[in-house]
Amino acid sequence: MTDAPRSSLFPADGVAAPLRYPVFRRIWLASLLSNLGLMIQSVGAAWAMTQMTSSADKVALVQTALMLPIMLISMPAGAVADMYDRRVVSLVSLVLSLVGAGTLTALTWLGLVTPNILLAFCFIIGSGMALFGPAWQSSVSEQVPHEVLPSAVALNGISYNIARSFGPAIGGIVVASAGAVAAFACNAVLYVPLLVMLLIWRRNVEVSRLPRERLSRAIVSGVRYILNSPSIRVVLARTLITGICGGSVSALMPLVARDLLHGGAQTYGIMLGAFGMGAVIGALNIGHARKHLSGEASIRLCALIMGAAIAVIAVSSEPVLTAAALVVAGAVWMLAVALFNIGVQLSAPRWVAGRSLAAFQAAIAGGIAIGSWGWGYLTDHVGVELALLTSAAAMFVSPLFGLWLRMPPIGARVEDADSLEDPEVRLALTGRSGPLVVEIEYRVDQEQARAFHGVMQDVQLSRQRNGAYGWSIARDIADPELWTERYHCPTWLDYLRQRNRSTQSERALHQRAMAFHLGPDPVRVRRMLERPFGSVRWKDDTPDIAANDVLPVSTPAGSSG
């Protein structure tokens, strides 16, 4: 999966450990340049818009055009990343952004850009990066071993925040010396190193023996998995809450520089740099936080510290004090976001990793977008200081959500289980035959009934997140030891996917359920085709070609359905 480490420059147990792996190191350095280019592009676009129009709405829409695609296409992008070769998806998305940036450069050079054209090309560039995100993030686990995956996630956060710290300043210099067209050209050029690194990466592709899902079904599968995965659901909810409560910092920072610190663009740039440098510090300490604190304790501590930092920003009129508070806010913000990201990456099996990370991107982007709008609206009515103090109070209160939405333990990555053999059948089936009805009979000691029922509630979530629906568990009223688990799959092909999507922990859960079974006979499994005539498209003269010499259905060891 990964190249062996060849460098002794990076410690094996620190945040820089992933840089020991040549593939990750090359791609990480190239992505840093790409992030810098995107920040320079943002500065150039905002400046170009101010030269073309005096409308504040149009200037603000530049950032909206760059960020909106993340909310709009995150889940389709995640599905595409899971369905196709992630390296190819990354290359295609980068080419899309490169074409957008190159065309915008040419049009600006020719003096043909209007505000609407500028916004359109910002949207195209943002769409390419939104498509790139899930494929790139989910491929990180293929570039480094799982034991250094958290550090790799932290390093990716460092890459973005280094760019955010220095990119705007570099962008300002470029625009001041050569104009917006130079900023657009820099962005286009800085995509090239990442394209080259992805081109020379020889990814190990595991070809599935089953055909890929259609895009619409893949999106549904991703949503279904997330809804039936308590750990991912909790992480996404806490991510959204944190984004809403803490979105005030980035949204109101220009007003902090202008109204509270009575500064100009230079002050604003310094404050942005302070927050970005704090984020780098936070990412560098992700390993220490995970070593000494649980996920829930870390998130609570980050929320409390950030609340205090926002309160200091609200009441401070001294640039040095505000900058110091922003460093602290940036550090705990990055730490919280990295922990959320790690929680999602380690909780999702490979087949749905892209979609899970896309949902995370949508949660953080949506939280910041909602929070930014809300804090801006509040500022119009009560002022910057009171709006920030309200945000600080919200951050102080947010740990209470942990009483209902407790962060799951952030441990080892879930491991995919080995594929199961396909069950033998007597009826002629196609991949589209269905729905399939599966019934599994267990004989359970009556004294173990409550414990068995509790395990089956976890089995229900396992079945449903992997593709089953209509799950139920029933007990025979004439024979209380007899229990029947029943669920549906849309088609025969969906059933085969559902059987082989289980992780090792889910297979162990199924074994726990089967361990309750009594008697010499094995657990009995029935697989039935609902509406069989329509499902196999029989005509009046079509013979029943089911063979009589096929062995009965057999369930491999370790499988319960």
Image: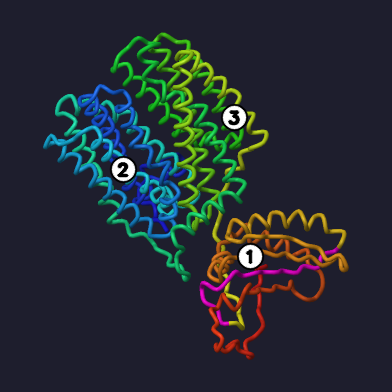
**SS state under label 1:** strand
Q: Earlier in the sequence, mark 3 or mark 1?
A: 3
Q: Is residue 28 above or below residue 179?
A: below
User: Along the line of sight, which residue is nearer the eye, 438 or 152?
Assistant: 438
- The magenta span reads 428-445
Tell me where residue 12 appears, x and y as whole percent. 44, 44
Give the x, y percent position of residue 360: 49, 43
Number of callouts:
3
Foreground disc of the pair 3, 1: 1
Foreground: 465 or 283? 465
Q: Residue at x 57, y 66 (%)?
A: 490
Q: Is residue 373 magenta?
A: no
* Residue placed under numbered mark 3 in the picture: 300
Q: Which residue is mark 2?
A: 29
Task: Name the residue tied to disc 1.
Answer: 488
Task: Point out the frontmost of discs 3 and 2.
Answer: 3
Hey, what amino acid is under mark 2?
Leu
- Helix, strand or loop at label 2? It is helix
Q: Position of residue 255 (x, y in %)?
A: 38, 17
Mark before the other along the chain sequence, 2 or 1 = 2
Residue 424's disc is: none
Q: Identify which amino acid the numbered label 1 is placed on.
A: His
Residue 245 visible in the snapshot? yes
Q: Earlier in the sequence, mark 3 or mark 2?
A: 2
Q: Quadrant of residue 260?
A: top left
In this rendering, the answer to whether 433 lies above or below 545 is above
Q: Residues within 10 Å of mark 1 (few under 14, many from 20)?
A: many
User: Quadrant of the rendered structure where residue 560 is?
Assistant: bottom right
| Residue at image location 75% in from the left, 74% down from the top | 522
> 10 Å neighbourhood of mark 2: few (<14), some, or many (≥20)?
some
